Amino acid sequence: MQKTFTYPKFDYVRPPELAEGRDGHYPVIVVGAGPVGLTAAIDLAHEGQPVLLLDDDDTVSIGSRGVCYAKRTLEVLDRIGCDNRFVDKGVSWDVGRTFFGEGEVFNFNLRPQAQHLRPGMINLQQYYLEQYLIERTGDVPQLEKRFKHKVIAVTPGDDKVTLRVETPDGAYTLTTDWLVVADGARSPIRTMLGLDIEGKVFMDRFLIADVVMAADFPAERWFWFDPPFHRNQSVLLHKQADNVWRIDFQLGWQADPVEEKKPENVIPRIKAMLGDEREFELEWVSVYTFQCRRMNQFNHGRVLFVGDAAHQVSPFGARGANSGIQDTDNLAWKLKLVMDGKAPAALLDTYGEERGYAADENLMNSTRSTDFITPKSTTSKVFRNAVLQLAAKYPFARALVNSGRLSVPSWLATSSLNTPDGDAFEGQMIPGAPLADAPVEVAGQPGWLLHQMGNRFQLLHYVDDASTLDEKTALALAQLAQAAIAIEAIIVAPRGQAPAGLKTLIDTDGCIAQRYDLRPGTTYLVRPDQHVAARWRALDASKIKAALARATCNA
């Protein structure tokens, strides 16, 4: 098999606890150096929190595995200081097409709206994502990594969590104030603690083939139901980096996973799809089953579960790693406030509330996609095929086609942290919504709104001309930064420059005003994870203070 990627090997380092014969203590320990654990560790550490990251392996994931990373995930990576290498290396795409037999019956565009920095989705092998995140950790001095360190016991307590860690040199003990568990779907720590996870396993098998070939297919998602080259089953095609193409073949539950992975069985399937004349080489092959399930509760005292350790979905819709990274996006700012003594531990209960809601949303969409892709009865299959036939001609049927509802951010409209609207607004930027991006000008340079947002509470205040901001308003906005939980005030305007000490964003194309339904005086309070906390038509310091208290469980 051809190899387009050289797997790094990370050095095992003898820990000081063993070298010095003592126990160790860290404020936060993250277990698991996959995409979710790495993102969590970077997010906490780049804001100044000392973090220890433990992993029982010494390389990145083998094979492409998670492939599709959504626009919101890319925005989270931007927020934690990652550069453009993910997008530069990955294959950007917005369009997906669904086929029934030989004909196209449906297509969609993940980014129908212009003037956003990031694409709707990129395809990038998971090993690249992990490698780039590990390289990012080298720029975060508060983050320590330890490879070949396996957690073999966890004992939660009221004021700390105790871990026993096994290494090639022997075992040692650590304690931590907070343990973030990102050790995957099988989660040994979840098992150690005897915690439940409920859902169902789907009785089907799928073959993944990473195929190296030169092909001029467009950078789109192509999904087939009952294609002529793989009758009565489904097939998914994605382009990845390095001319590697990901092909998923539905096999059926009775397929033998060992036999199906053999090249002599894989290659004929691919030739039937691509034609005998197409040259290709296999890079990686795997057979998988999947399940849709979640823990009843994600936070258990000082132990916090994220990603696949907390919830699992089918791969259709790219909701696995994307939802896990959004878990960390939700958790990190809350944990930091609690650790800094600026919010009560009850704030962490809202992590479970908000991301539990998101998990339920993902499970629902994932289950519906799976039921459509793999009908469980003859009647269900007849209905599915009828929908596909009708979709070629009738718009109403296209809405029923489900080859995987692609990952989108959760709109936390029902969150207890939101301050309900007291004024009338149009548009989508409701309390709980993730911020929409837009082009801006900052200090005379072109930029993007989301690059100015995040990692702290912020206030967007709109005026017609920033240079005419009155002294009383400027003083009130500046004073927000002096509170125990500081709020950075930002002036948004089509022109002008606010007084010194206040950042000004020029809404060059009126895009922010349109997307946020802005009028002079309109004010938005934004959380550190770039979600709307509250909004008003006029600046009112007492309302801002109350909304901040509500958003941090200090009310």
Image: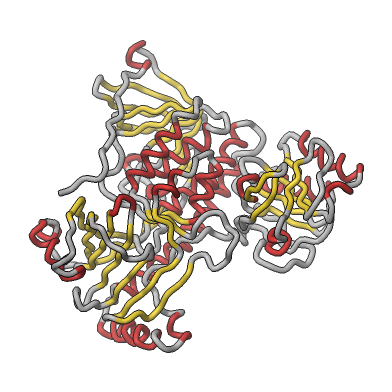
Identify the residue shown where x is 23% and y is 68%: 250
Q: Position of residue 119 (x, y in %)?
A: 49, 57
**Vertical arrangement, residue 450 with respect to residue 107, above or below:** above
Query: Is residue 21 or residue 544 the one in the foreground?
Result: 544
Say whether residue 415 is visible: no
**Vertical arrangement, residue 79 with respect to residue 17, above or below:** below
Identify the residue shown where x is 21% and y is 61%: 207
**Vertical arrangement, residue 327 with respect to residue 107, above or below:** above
Q: What is the count of numbered marks?
A: 0
Q: Please identify the residue farthest to the left as the structure is shown.
A: 264
Q: Position of residue 142 (x, y in %)?
A: 50, 26
- 395 on left or right of 214: right
Q: Position of residue 221 (x, y in %)?
A: 37, 66
Identify the residue shown where x is 25% and y is 38%: 6
Say whether residue 267 is visible: yes
Identify the residue shown where x is 31% and y is 18%: 14
**Vertical arrangement, residue 299 with respect to residue 145, above or below:** below
What is the quadrant of residue 532 in the picture? bottom right
What is the quadrant of residue 69 in the picture? bottom left
Say how the picture is coloured: secondary structure
- 413 on left or right of 96: right
Q: Position of residue 323 (x, y in %)?
A: 45, 54
